[in-house]
Amino acid sequence: WLSLRRMVGSRSKLRPASRPKIVKKKSNKFVRFEADMWKRMNPAWRKPHGMDGRFRRHFKGTPKHVKIGYGSNKKTRFLMPDGFVKFVVNNVAELELLLMHNKKYACEIAHNVSARKRKVIVERADQLSIKVTNPDARLRSEEAE
């Protein structure tokens, strides 16, 4: 495991082919109108449908609505801050798909992959020079025992 830990340190030097500046048009989330008033109300966005609702009618002083203009740039839509696009991997065969695309995609090992398979995936990713976003996810619990 210690040799694997050393490999993890060397792998962090991988860089994407291009790293455009990510511009967010709106930093805070769109929340459901008046969701802050009740704990039982889910804050996830819902379109207002009320007949007389001041929020649906865009009265002054009400929060902004979801609109297509707030969408992200197509080139930077799913980019992580380091410039890579996340690709969830369940096994080594899926990792092989990223062989020619290791400058654009970084692999993330799925949450339900065992520690033994994770070790194999991390070693193979190191051979293919593919960035792994969570290389030591179950490594910590194994070392503690």
Image (spheres, rainbow, N blue to C red):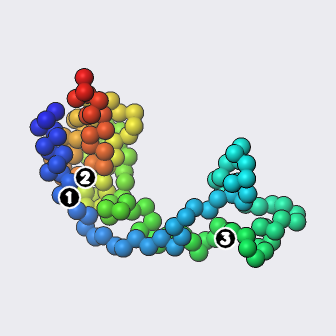
Of residue 113 and residue 144, the one placed in the foreground of this image is: 144
Q: Dots 3 and 2: beta carbons under 8 Å? A: no
Task: Identify the amino acid type marked 2.
Answer: Lys
Residue 38, given in percent of the width and then of the height, sits at 73, 48
**Cβ atoms under marks 2 and 1 closer than 8 Å:** yes
**Residue 64, numbered circle:** 3
Q: Is residue 49 or residue 99 the one in the foreground?
A: 49
* Alpha carbon separation for disc pair 3 and 2: 38 Å
Q: Is residue 42 above or below residue 24?
A: above
Task: Identify the mark nearer the N-term, 3 or 2.
Answer: 3
**Res. 29 in view:** yes
Question: Residue shown at 25%/57% (left/top)?
Answer: 102
The quadrant of the image that shows the N terminus is top left
Considering the numbered disc 1 on the image, is that residue within a helix, a strand or a loop?
loop
The quadrant the C terminus occupies is: top left
Residue type at tag 3:
Lys
Q: Is residue 116 above or below residue 22?
A: above
Instruction: Specify the farthest residue to the right.
Output: 52
* 15 to the left or right of 91: left
Q: Position of residue 109 (x, y in %)?
A: 33, 42
Disc 3 element: loop
Q: Residue 137 or 113: which is nearer the viewer?
A: 137
Rendered residue at 32%/30% (across/down)? 114
Q: How many badges with numbers are in the image?
A: 3
